[in-house]
Image (cartoon, rainbow, N blue to C red):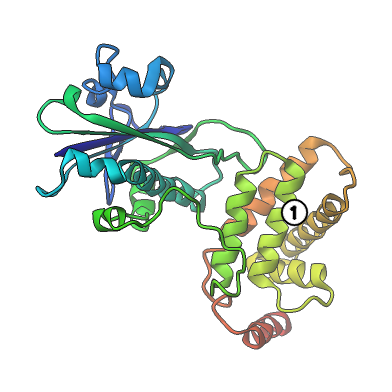
Amino acid sequence: MRYRFITVVHFLKLGKSNCIIPLLSGMLSNKSSLLKEILSYQSTLALGTMGVHSIDEFQGNTFYFVDGEFDASITQEKVGSFGTNLAFGLLRQIQSLTNGLWSIRDNSVYVRDGFLFVFDKEFEDGVSFKASLSTINTKASGLIEEVCFSKEEIERVSESMQVISMDDVSSGTNFRDATQFQYFKNAKMGRKAIAELYVFHARASASLSMKVLLYITAMEALISTSTAELSHQVAERVAVLLGNDASARIAIYNDIKKGYGYRSKTAHGEALKGTEQDVAGLLERLDDYLRQLLRFDVPFNLEPEQINLFFLNKLLN
């Protein structure tokens, strides 16, 4: 039994046309001829599963493609028990890569609907499954627009993408539901992992005020060690880490403090002052600060007292 999985990677532009980029699992491409057999209006299986509108979405867009073969013991009947779960697993697999692209630059790349086709000898004699995710990423400014990444950048991010195993799928691991970390301490997540989770939710929000709230909370999770003079502590530490000179540190400090002002108004149901362009511009800078911060391991992997000592030495030196 063979299987093929496809999904559109929305708003991802590849650096070259007719490009094929092998990943740890599957490949990214904008070469539409690769999907000619599947994306045919004459294919009863494809048309019945995807519909005309979903087939049209692939035209001229980047897509993710996985072509594989099951173990000989897997029958079509058995696939029916885990086919949808496999479709979700493969969709989350490419979602892990699209999320990773943020570490390179701000973007609004996302995946939504994934289609899995399982067949033996003839494609039309097979069965199909569909999986859908609800997260729609937006840029820090709230815009949704095409962003270009080079083959080298995508290959670099691919090195850490999530890869599912067929054993996990067939043994019952649930890929349908997003993992929810309700209690960060109990989940034993590190500072960077918690901050990345807040960034993930910020990018998934279309509201600029909610983005500010989540970006500032991400910085707190990453860098704060007490609640005393919290906004000053976070602003000062981010400025010390990222500013190359006094003027740069002052600008960063002021941005973080302004972000705290916006966050406070959002949390208390007040309207934000200033223009939408002002808020969007601040968000773009906060987004970039977080991207830079998350490239550090030290001091975020240290204990709170060690973090305090680290920044004390930074300030006094």
Dot 1: what SS? helix
Q: Quadrant of the C terminus?
A: bottom right
In this rendering, does residue 203 appear at all?
yes
Towards the viewer: 111 or 84 = 84
Q: Which residue is mark 1?
A: 213
As drawn, 264 above or below 192: above
Towards the viewer: 78 or 180 = 78
Q: Quadrant of the N terminus?
A: top left
Q: Residues within 10 Å of mark 1 (few under 14, many from 20)?
A: many
Would residue 125 be found to the left or right of residue 53 on screen?
A: left
Q: Image quarter for residue 91?
A: top left
Residue 78 horizontal/vertical position (percent): 21, 44
Residue at (27, 53) in percent of width and height: 170
Residue 152 horizontal/vertical position (percent): 34, 47
Residue at (61, 63) in percent of width and height: 182
Would residue 20 be found to the left or right of residue 209 on screen?
A: left
Q: Amino acid at mark 1?
A: Leu
